[in-house]
Amino acid sequence: MVTFLAGGTGTPKLLSGAGDVFAPERTTVVANTGDDIELGGHLVCPDLDTVLFLDGGELDRETWWGIADDTAATHDELHRLAAAADLPTGPQYLPEDAQTSGRDIARYRRFSGVAEFMHIGDRDRAVHVTRTSLLDAGYSLTEVTRQLADAFGLDRELLPMSDDPVATMIHTPQGPMHFQEWWVGRNGEPPVEDVEFRGGDQASATEAVLDALSEPVVVGPSNPVTSLGPMLAVDGVAGALADTPVVAVSPFVENEVFSGPAADLMAGVGREPSTAGVAEAYPFADAFVLDGEDDTALDRPVVRTDTTMETEGDAERVARTVADALAEVA
């Protein structure tokens, strides 16, 4: 058995080629939910859904977001209505008192659906409607995720990091804003001054997550701040990782990041944006997989390969290197 911690696109890319190395029926994926938002009344779980659509054979591999060849009639009509009625566009939070009312799982991250600022396809939206309706019927996010996984025919077990709300808030000179507003709505602007995992001090890992973390763990090349940070803020996760073999794949080649905002976010929270900074952020990691061009000296075992993952074959190569690293520490 092995458990992957997933967020963003880095770990899903690794998972796309890992099936022949780590048998799916013996693999669990714990996904970040700090990026989740409630948009137009529907709970959107980007990191859960990337794995859901990947393992269900539906993921748009061009964007690593949403369902391939999905239509967008509802999204387009929302924008037409907003333009015709001269309504505001861009990220629009619901009123402050609404941020702590309604569904607990959506606390601090409720956005209006008027001219929605995230592109949601029609089939993708059906997942969010189903998820939210099941939550309203009294199911936990873990239970709902298992039901959706059954609907998509997943062999890997997929779990949210917690059934409690954790909202990743980016602190900027213009005030705090949810990660999705900062990254999707504002294209990674303004500068990052700090990152807060709001609700993390009250959130707990589920028994299912703790059971998964009792097995060897793989941390893929996801963003250390906004993909792994929310998980580490949840009670029980950091302690569990300290007690089990962990191999981490660096999303950097020395001080160059493969993609995404990891460098800006790490600098914003006072960490060196580099492989060395990742190692400092992951004191629980027993070994690292680094790119062959990355000469960073670490105080833990290192296995190197080409960590570029443009194809499933590339991902399989990295997965086999991860297996080699796990064999050294497990």
Image: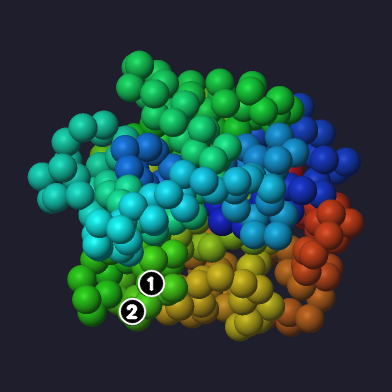
Task: Locate residue 325: give its quadrant.
Answer: bottom right
Q: Quadrant of the N terminus?
A: top right
Task: Locate residue 183: give its quadrant.
Answer: bottom left
Q: Residue at x 33, y 52 (%)?
A: 81
Q: Quadrant of the C terminus?
A: top right
Task: Locate residue 158: give its quadrant.
Answer: top right
Q: Position of residue 84 (x, y in %)?
A: 30, 58
Label 1 crowd bin: few (<14), some (14–19), many (20+), radius 10 Å: some
Q: Position of residue 252 (x, y in %)?
A: 64, 74
Q: Position of residue 193 (x, y in %)?
A: 30, 76
Say if mark 2 contacts mark 1, CB within 8 Å: yes
**Number of numbered discs:** 2
Give the camera-side residue of 63 and 267. 63
Spatial CA distance of label 2 from label 1 is 8 Å
Q: Residue at x 34, y 80 (%)?
A: 191
Residue at mark 1: 186
Label 2 crowd bin: few (<14), some (14–19), many (20+), radius 10 Å: some
Residue at mark 2: 190
In the image, what residue type sits under mark 2? Answer: Pro
The secondary structure type at the circle numbered 1 is loop
Q: Residue at x 52, y 46 (%)?
A: 73
In the rendered view, does 178 fall on the left or right side of 216? left
